[in-house]
Every structure is written in structure tokens, then in C-alpha cells.
Image (cartoon, rainbow, N blue to C red):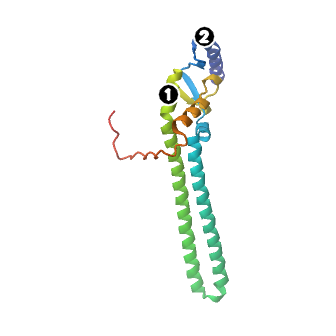
Amino acid sequence: MRLIALILSLVTVLSVAPPVLAQNLGQLVSPILTIDREALFEQSRFGQRVSSDLDAESAALSEETRKIEQELEAEEQALTDQRDSMTAEEFRAAADAFDARVVQLRNDRDAAQSDFVRRFETAQRDFYNRIGPALGQIMQQRGAVVLLDKRSVLLAANAIDVTEEAIALIDETFGEGSNLVPEAPADPDTPAAPE
């Protein structure tokens, strides 16, 4: 019931809002703007370049994993083929060594995958940190005080969506971003500098 009341209130405000909200050079001036964060990453040249780099790294990681799996299968088959020519103790020792190697390689692959996920999250966080000033510029030009992700907004007028404008500004400001050095992650043990 509260949701319906909230929607009706929002519809009422939006229907009354046009006289309150000013038009500035063809742009709606609103204290609230929305943006599609995923589109910024997927459609800007900077985000696409970061995504392409990460996709290439992921493909290389997958290819390396496939090669390791093939090597292990061949090694397992060779061990199975040699079983008849080995004593039970020799076979058990070889099988245990093989199992230990499999476990170690699996742990290494898991660690590599976790490291990749961390780098992916860091790259996305770096992207959003770097484009923050561009988004702030759009907010200032539009007279906004808040910028919300479209996915968290239930209902909004399309005029307050600045995604395409932001992508154009990101492309103009950063291009592919290939000349940017990734920001170093904050050291949790280092105290913040006073403002």
C-alpha cells in the first residue's frame, strides 16, 4: 500500500513539476538525475577498452586451464597404462603424487581465478572513480544535487536520464583511457590525509 502511495505521490509531483523545473538551453534542470552505470562501462570507449583487456586476460586464463586439464588427463592415462608394470606400493606412491599435484594445480587455478576477479573489480572501481569528475560536471551543468543509478529508481521521467550525455563526455575526456595508469588501491593501514 505504501508503494502505491509513493508512486501516486511521485506521479503527482512529476505532473506538477514542469512549471517548477526550468528548461536551460534545451536541457531539463532537475535536482535529481539518473544514469545507467552498466551502460557507462559497456558503451564508453574507456569502459570498452578496460572490458576488452579483461576479456583477453580471462580467455588466456581459460586457455591455460584447458591446457593443464589436458596434461593432467594425459598424465592420468599414462599412470593407468603403467599400473600393470608397477608394484602396488609403486603405483600407490605414483597415484598419491599425482593426486597431490592435482590438488596443488586446482589451488593454483582457484587462486588465479580469485586474483582475476579482484583485478576485474579493481578495474571497474578505478573506471568509476576516474569518471566521477565528468559526472559531477554534468550534475553541475544540470543544477542537480543527486545522481542515481536507474536500476534503483522505480519511476522517473526520461528527461532526467543523462547516460548518453555522460558516455559522450567520458569518450571526449578519456578516449580509450589507455594512457591512464591504474590508481593504486588504498592501503588500509595508511591514515587518510586531512582535508
Between residues 75 and 169, which one lies in front from this camera angle? Answer: 169
Between residues 90 and 145, which one lies in front from this camera angle? Answer: 145
State whether residue 56 is above or below residue 157: below
Q: Can residue 145 be seen in this view?
A: no
- Tag 2: residue type? Pro
Indicate the secondary structure of the residue bearing disc 1: helix
Mark 2 surroundings within 10 Å by alpha-carbon count, few (fewer than 14), some (14 through 19), many (20 or more): few
- Tag 1: residue type? Gln
Which of the two discs, 2 and 1, labels the residue nearer the N terminus? 2
Across and down, in percent, residue 39 comes to 62, 37
Between residues 164 and 72, which one lies in front from this camera angle? Answer: 164
Quadrant into which the C terminus falls: top left
Residue 72 found in image quarter: bottom right
Name the residue located 51 percent from the left edge and 55 percent from the top edge.
115
Label drawn at residue 19: 2
State whether residue 140 is above or below residue 130: above
Indicate the secondary structure of the residue bearing disc 2: helix
Q: Is residue 27 visible?
A: yes
Disc 1: which residue:
137
Q: Give the Cα distance between marks 2 and 1.
A: 25 Å
User: From the viewer's perspective, is 181 left or right of 164?
Assistant: left
Name the residue located 60 percent from the left edge and 49 percent from the top edge.
52
